[in-house]
Structure formats: C-alpha cells, structure tokens
Amino acid sequence: MRTHAPRTSAIVATALAALLALPAASSGPEANATIVGDVTPVAHFPGIGGSEVDSDGERYLFAGQANLRDDLNRQNVEEGQHGGLRIIDLDTMSVVGELACPGTDNYVRYLDPEVYNTPAGDREYVVMAHHGNLCTADALADDPNTRPAYGGFNGVMVVDVTDKTVPSIVSLVGHDSAHTVMPHPTRPYLYILPGGLANGTNVDTGRVSPTGIVDLSDPLEPRYVQAFEHNAQGCHDLGFSHDGDHAFCAGLGEVQVWDIAGDAIEDPNVVGTIVNPAIQFAHNAVVSPSGRYLAINDEAFGFHTCSGEAADLYGSLWIYDISVPELPLLAGRIAPPDHPDDQGFGTLYDAGPINGWADSWCAAHNYNWVPGNDDVIVASWFAGGITAHDISNLLAPELIAHYMPEDGVAWSGHYYAGYLVTNDMVRGVEVLDAPEVRAADPTWSAPEEPGRPGRPDQPGRPDQPGRPDQPGRPDQPGRPDQPGQAGPSGRSVTTSLSGVPTDASAVAALPRVDRSALLLPEVLPARPEAPRQPGFGGGFCVLPGRPA
C-alpha cells in the first residue's frame, strides 16, 4: 500500500480558471426531434464534447465538456480548445460559471457537502476525472501514480464551487488511468476508475487496471491510499449501496460486488460477481432509491441493433435484484430505442452520420433513478436520445418520455431537480420539462418563486396521494412479488406507496425472483466481429465470450 499527497502549490499556479464569455441559453429543440410523452425543451446550452453532468439536487448543474474534435474523436490538449466545466443555474437557465480546462473526458461528480468538506464545513466541491487536461499537465508531471495521456496526465482535480461564478482547482491526485471518478456516499473517499477495458494497465509499474482509492478527508490535501487490483479489465464505473457497505464494479465481461464496510473501504473484498452473457460491456452500475435494485447498462460498442423492438438484446439496461448483494438475481430489462435515421444497428465502425462510432449507437450509457422511486429510471442512449421508463412491471417497461434530436449523441441522460437533463456530444446541455416524470419524484416540490422557467404551473405536491390524473392501470399488474403494488390506484410515486420499504433489513426480506429464464434466450443473437477505428487501436473488437 502506498500513499501520496499532491503538491497544492503547483496546482494553484497551473489552474487556468479563467472565466469565458458565458453564453445565454437558447430555447426550443433547434432541430427535428422525436418526442414521446409530454416533453418540452426548456433551455439549450450548445457545445461540442458533452460528457457527464451532475447536480447538487436543488439548483445547479455541473456539466463536463471534453475537448473533442468536430468529428467527436479525442485529441491531445492544446491552448485555445474548448472543454472543462460549466455551471448552470436552473433558476435563471444560464451558465453562471465556467472552468476553461480542455481535457478528455472531463467526467464530473458533485461531492455531498455533508461528507466532503473542510473543518469549517462551509465549502462545496466537485471532482473531475480526465485522461489528459491542459490545466493539470504541469502539476501532475511528477506525480508517481499517474501516466501521460492526450498531451497531459491522468488524474482527478478537486474544484471548489462554493462561488458558482468562479470555480477554482484546489487540489489534484494522479492515477494510472482516470476515466471516471466516484465519491463514496457516506465517507470521504474517492474511487478513480480506469475504464473497464484493461486501459488502466501500467507497464512501467506492473499494475493491472487498478482502481485508485483516495482519502479525501481534507479536500485540499488528497491522500492516495492504494492502487487496488482486482481483475484484468478494471472498472469503468462504480456504484454504491446507500449505506456504503457494498460497491458494484462494472467492466468488460462482469460486474464485481465488493464489500467495502469498515476498514475494507481502503482495501475492498470481492464477494460476488454478475456475469450476463448478453452484456458485451458492463459500463455502469447504479443502485435504486430503496437499495433493492441495481441497473447495469450494456455499452455494446461491438454491435447492437436499434429497431426499437423489445427483442433488441444488446445495448440494453438490465435490472438486478440486489436485496442480497452477494447474490444478485436478474429481474428486468429495458431494450434500446430505435435509431433516428432508421440505420438499424450500431458498431464501432460503420457509415454513421459523423464518423461511424457513437453517432451510430443506441446503446444505454449514463443514467439515474428518479429520487425516492424504484419505478422510474432515466437514461441516455447516444443517438437514441434520452428516455424515462416506468418499470413498475419489470417484465413490461413502459416508455413515458423520450427526446431524440436527429443530430444528437446523448452522452448523459438524468433526472435532476425536476427536469430531464442531457449532456450531448454534439448539441451540448439541454434541459427538458417532463411533468409525468417529475410527478414520480416524491422529493420534489416547486420553488417558491412562481416565475421559475419551465415550472410556472407546478404549485408543489405536499401530499401526492396517488396520481388522481392516473386512474389506474388494470393491465399493469406491477411486480407480482411485491405486495401492495397491483391495485387500481395508479402509478406509485414513492417507495413506501409502491410497497418497497426503505429499511435495509426489510428490503432483504422481500421475495426474490430470478427471471433469467424469461429474459435471456437459450441462444443469443449472433455477434459479428466489429472492425475498430485506427484511433481505438486497430484490429477487431474482442467481445466477451459466453460463459460455460
């Protein structure tokens, strides 16, 4: 186990936190778009290279932007490029702050101030992971835990966003490969994820795709705890149980279940594995509000079909019952949407509108659950746009909202603070009003100011007794293994109303049903070899084999 604390003095000298001319939002889709349900574009913040976007859950969005070329390919960092962090105020629908830091991929996560703070407890922070970044290239050059990439070095920057108009880098930590970063929900630790495709292997040190574990008790002085090696491919993303005792590492070929309770937070134990032969690349793993379910998306870059039919298997969003975390059971699946130009398939190399990779995809990418409700999940699907599904019947998910611009490549799709939010690789950030999705959020109440954009008719929902505008769906029996959910009162809006308790012991006591036989065919659809672009290393994409 090794420790390392980066030099904050060098960071201050190289943190190019210059504010740019902050653009105003434009309204309207500005392009032809497929829309399902009551979805209205509210604000649009254009930009190439949209990556992950996070929120404080109340007012602000924190949107990463990579320095992608116009053809969406990555490039080495240079002066004058776009990219960095944009802070968007949902009250005024405007960009209020920007950190000009060109880099790849500039993956952003907001840190809960109750967990991550200074001793005074008066600051707010986000973290941003990158393979290479202009703002950190000099400061990370001597970090023993990093490697060079894209004209810079792999690492994570800690950004003080207390003053939203002047975000500033306050510390850095390097790692072998910093594709994404995930903060622990209850204790001040960061997990830096290499990418899940063995892209974190460090030949010089002999480390194999490790996860970087960082103690962030002091955001100004991160402590690099260790490079945790656990399989050959590493994690692309990491999800957590709400109590913080378990983590779910998604990567090529499998999702590992880690015990990280107590001292294991610095040295995890692998206690379970999810292997689904229909998942080509397990990209992310996100736990539901009650803690009962885990959503795993398949970023099936090798090959997937985009017909919009339920039979489309690859590229799906898969739902697992994790009420016993060490023994996950397959519970449901959401199929990809159709492709906007009826291309019908997506691969790493084909005749896509731009250059034939992400712009041809309709596979699931970044996503989240509506707070306090296991029944509604929001997701991005690259060219397939952003969706919201009601999964109260896990065997028959219902599409309740869909926004798919014909020129869009949605990297991220989330529900934040009453809105659908997408960060698009081509179009930038878009904020969408979707009343039916918002009505499923028991934590939401309208702001006091009546003129807040996009919500003039949302007076608040103090009781939300059961959606009187939804008189019930006798054809939607719900989850048969969950008592109290099949009645005629309409779609549930809270975990308690839906019969899913929030207490961990009660969740563990619920009946468990393995639906693998219903959801996985005996013979999987053929998966042809997919030639890779030269920029991805050439050769053919190796898809994980079906387990014996």
Image (cartoon, rainbow, N blue to C red):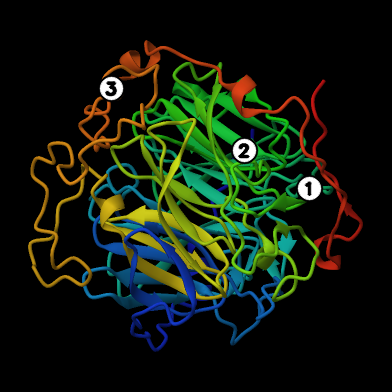
Residue 250: give its label. Answer: 2
**254 is higher (above) or lower (below) than 7:** above
Describe residue 333's horizontal placement relative to residue 419 as left or right: right
Residue nearest the viewer, comparing 439 with 13: 439
Which residue is under mark 3?
A: 501
Which quarter of the rendering shows the C terminus? Answer: top right
Residue 202: give its label. Answer: 1
Closer to the chain start, of discs 3 and 1, is 1
At a point 64% along the width and 51% down the height, the residue shown is 175
Which quarter of the rendering shows the N terminus? Answer: top right
- In the image, residue 184 lies at what x, y percent? 43, 38
- In the image, residue 10 lies at what x, y percent? 53, 68
Residue nearest the viewer, comparing 487 with 46: 487
Q: Which residue is farthest front?
A: 475
Q: Gap between marks 1 and 2, in whole Å?
A: 20 Å
Closer to the chain start, of discs 1 and 2, is 1
Describe residue 505's horizontal placement relative to residue 411 as left or right: left
Residue nearest the viewer, comparing 245 with 217: 245
Residue nearest the viewer, comparing 209 with 285: 285
* Residue count near mark 3 (Cα–Cα under 10 Å), binned few <14, some 14–19, many ≥20: some
Closer to the chain start, of discs 2 and 3, is 2
Query: Identity of the amino acid at label 2?
Result: Ala
* Residue count near mark 1 (Cα–Cα under 10 Å), binned few <14, some 14–19, many ≥20: some
Q: Are marks 3 and 1 in contact (CB under 8 Å)?
A: no
- In the image, residue 237 lies at what x, y percent? 58, 44
Count of numbered badges drawn on the protein: 3
Q: Are marks 1 and 2 in contact (CB under 8 Å)?
A: no
